[in-house]
Image (cartoon, rainbow, N blue to C red):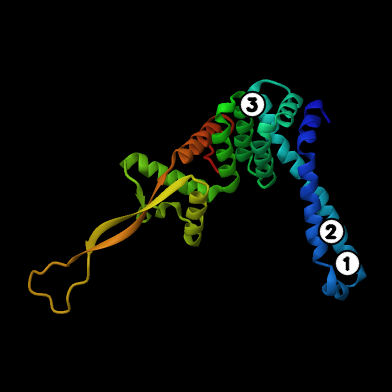
Amino acid sequence: MTEDQGGGNQLVGLLARAGAAGVAAAAGLAVAGPAGGMIGSAASQMAVDLTEAMASKLGERRRQRTAVPVEHAAECLGIAVPEVTDRLTDEPELEHVTTTVLIGALSTESHEKLLFLGRVLANVLTDRAVLEEEQFLAQAIAAIEAPHVRLLDLIESQQTKSGRIVSQYALGGAELGAAFSAVLKTLESVGLIASSSIVEMRNGPMPRHPTPGEKPPQVPVATPHWVATELGKALLKRLREIAAGDIPSDQCVVL
């Protein structure tokens, strides 16, 4: 293990061990109580062995993932990993954002998200004035995956082209199917989009016996619309920068 890797493990070891222990505990509950008695000792031991193996592998993978943001922050700042680790752990005002970054890293396999989180750490170490915005960005990136980015990008792109907020009828290109509402809800909950209801006049039903040349009556219909917030635009901008610099140019932003 290199000195840099040791510094990263110092920062993330506790969270990684807690994650592995949580997996073991959850699997242990599955064979406890009355159900456990019916499973039998051999099956129970098999479950314990499997749980320990999973916990060990998950723990190692999590340690590797949580090290990436710290290492990328060190690369961005041009300093050693142990120095990043020391600064993040020695300054109380950075505790919240550091914890958010590490928990976000634990829950993703996406290299792009890990780099994004690393830039959060680099930015807050460089300028405390951006701490609040970076905290929100870290929370937002930790909460979303590829479908969210795809829909956010579609909303922001259409908004830029038309200069207007985007209606639900313009979002079919995201091809989210049954997940559409859930993805919208997540984007809105982390502040990446904002919604509003706009009343538009539409053709209503014709009377049963219309007179010749009679036109359909106009009725007000409220339709939902969305707009990418400044936070959403900032998140997309950073993802595009990462795609342009740290990811092969023939790949799109896919989390």
Q: CA distance from mark 2 to mark 1?
A: 10 Å
- Compared to residue 169, the image places residue 96 above or below, namely above
Which residue sits at x=51%, y=49%? Answer: 148
Label 3 amino acid? Answer: Leu
Query: Which residue is under mark 3?
Result: 125
Task: Give the side of residue 119 with respect to residue 152, left or right.
Answer: right
What residue occupies the far bottom of the structure in this picture?
A: 209
Residue 174 position within the rendered picture, expressed as x and y whole percent measured from the top left = 45, 52
- Outermost residue on the left side: it is 212
Residue count near mark 3 (Cα–Cα under 10 Å), binned few <14, some 14–19, many ≥20: some
Q: Nearer the viewer, mark 3 or mark 1?
A: 3
- Image quadrant in which you'd find residue 83: top right
Nearest the viewer among 135 and 179 is 135
SS label for mark 3: helix
Side of 76 where 167 appears, left or right: left
Q: Residue at x 90, y 72 (%)?
A: 40
Residue at image point 79% right, 50% down: 20
Q: CA distance from mark 2 to mark 3?
A: 41 Å
Side of 208 where 115 appears, left or right: right
Q: Which residue is mark 1?
A: 44
* Nearer to the camera, 80 or 126: 126
Residue 50 numbered mark, or none: 2
State whether residue 174 is above or below residue 76: below
Q: Are the residues flagged by discs 3 and 1 in contact, CB closer than 8 Å? A: no
Query: In the image, residue 49 lies at what x, y percent?
Result: 88, 58
Residue type highlighted by circle 1: Ser
